[in-house]
């Protein structure tokens, strides 16, 4: 009887150890599929690239100075296929590469008085996004991203029917603190910091190039600061970084396309077409978020 109890004790010990073994395997970037073979550390879903390629290209165009804050369309478009968290994580290294191109193109043209207000405020927003990260589900993130997309679209169509921004009283610099904090927070969540920043800067005495150059420098700072919390939160996985590398050639192509369009083409038709697309995508994300709650 003692022998049987000893054997039973050994079996239980072996079972407990065996159950604990999968933990480090589960933490690996390589995942085992149904076939038992390890998946490649790269997103291979073709529908992801159907959404990601135009999303990255459009973000590059916006970074190049054409389309204003239209880069907000990127995460909502990619979030139709993957989670908003993964879409944002894949985009971040690409945005950092785009920022280098944009800084070179618009070097020395940004306005430091505006940046002294917006940069510290945006860092506060990034810290807030980092602290609240663990409390937001995928459904909540889809609701946030979809709401930002729709609000930005409605803001564009309403303001386009009103007097031009030059005829409106400029915002005082103090408003920049609120705009910067909101821009840092929404940029951390979904790289959609453009709307609050644009709403502020468009009501400041800036010409078109001053506006673009200042936003280029601001979001370069924001994106490089975001690398630290994204890495700390485990979003810069091998899978996401490898996917970013595959899409990265689109970064300079998009930026230089935006620079060319900024110099040669009117914004009007492009704006309207892209904002209609943004409104549709935002509505889809809102529906997905509401039905998932």
Image (cartoon, helix red, strand yellow):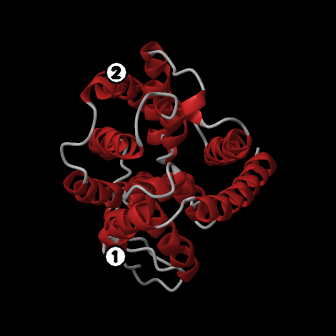
Foreground: disc 1 or disc 2: 2
Q: Which mark is residue 134?
A: none
Taking the spot 37% from the left edge, 68% from the top edge, the residue there is 260
Q: Where does the image place residue 282, in percent across and percent down from the top left?
A: 70, 53
Packing grade of label 2 (10 A; few <14, some 14-19, many >=20) is some
Residue 180, above or below 72: above
| Residue 29 appears in view | no
Q: Which residue is mark 1?
A: 246
Secondary element at tag 1: helix
Against 87, residue 51 (above or below) is below
N-terminal of the two: label 1 or label 2?
A: 2
| Residue 122 x, y percent position in the rendering | 39, 28
Q: Residue at x 28, y 42 (%)?
A: 217
- Going 49% across and 26% down the picture, which residue do you hit? 179
- Residue 82: percent from left, percent from top: 57, 63
Q: Which residue is mark 2?
A: 117
Quarter of the picture holding the C terminus: top right
Find residue 119 and report its image quarter.
top left
Splitting the image into 4 quarters, where does residue 47 fall? bottom right
Which is nearer the eye, 6 or 48?
48
Disc 1 and disc 2: Cα gap in Å?
36 Å
Q: Looking at the image, do the residues carrying marks 1 and 2 touch, with CB atoms under 8 Å apart?
A: no
Q: Secondary structure at mark 2?
A: helix
Quadrant in which residue 214 is drawn: top left
């Amino acid at each position: 009887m003692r022998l049987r109890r000893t054997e039973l004790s050994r079996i239980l010990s072996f079972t407990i150890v065996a159950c604990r073994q999968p933990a480090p395997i589960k933490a690996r970037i390589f995942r085992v599929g149904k076939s038992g073979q390890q998946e490649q550390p790269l997103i291979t879903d073709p529908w992801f690239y159907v959404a990601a390629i135009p999303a990255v290209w459009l973000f590059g165009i916006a970074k190049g100075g054409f389309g204003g804050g239209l880069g907000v369309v990127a995460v909502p478009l990619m979030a139709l296929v993957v989670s908003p968290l993964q879409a944002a994580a894949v985009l971040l290294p690409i945005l950092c590469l785009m920022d280098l191109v944009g800084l070179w193109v618009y070097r020395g043209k940004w306005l430091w008085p505006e940046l002294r207000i917006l940069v510290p405020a945006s860092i506060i927003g990034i810290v807030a996004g980092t602290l609240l990260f663990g409390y937001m589900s995928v459904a909540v993130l889809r609701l946030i991203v979809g709401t930002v997309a729709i609000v930005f679209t409605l803001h564009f169509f309403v303001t386009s029917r009103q007097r031009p921004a030059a005829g409106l009283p400029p915002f005082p610099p103090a408003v920049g603190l609120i705009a910067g904090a909101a821009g840092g927070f929404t940029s951390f969540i979904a790289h959609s910091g453009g709307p609050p920043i644009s709403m502020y800067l468009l009501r400041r005495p800036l010409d078109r190039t001053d506006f673009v150059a200042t936003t280029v420098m601001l979001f370069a700072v924001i994106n490089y600061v975001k690398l630290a919390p994204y890495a700390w939160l485990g979003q810069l996985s091998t899978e996401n970084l490898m996917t970013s590398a595959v899409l990265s050639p689109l970064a300079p192509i998009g930026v230089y396309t935006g620079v060319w369009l900024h110099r040669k083409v009117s914004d009007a038709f492009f704006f309207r077409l892209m904002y209609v697309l943004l409104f549709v995508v935002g509505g889809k994300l809102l529906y997905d978020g509401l039905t998932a709650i």
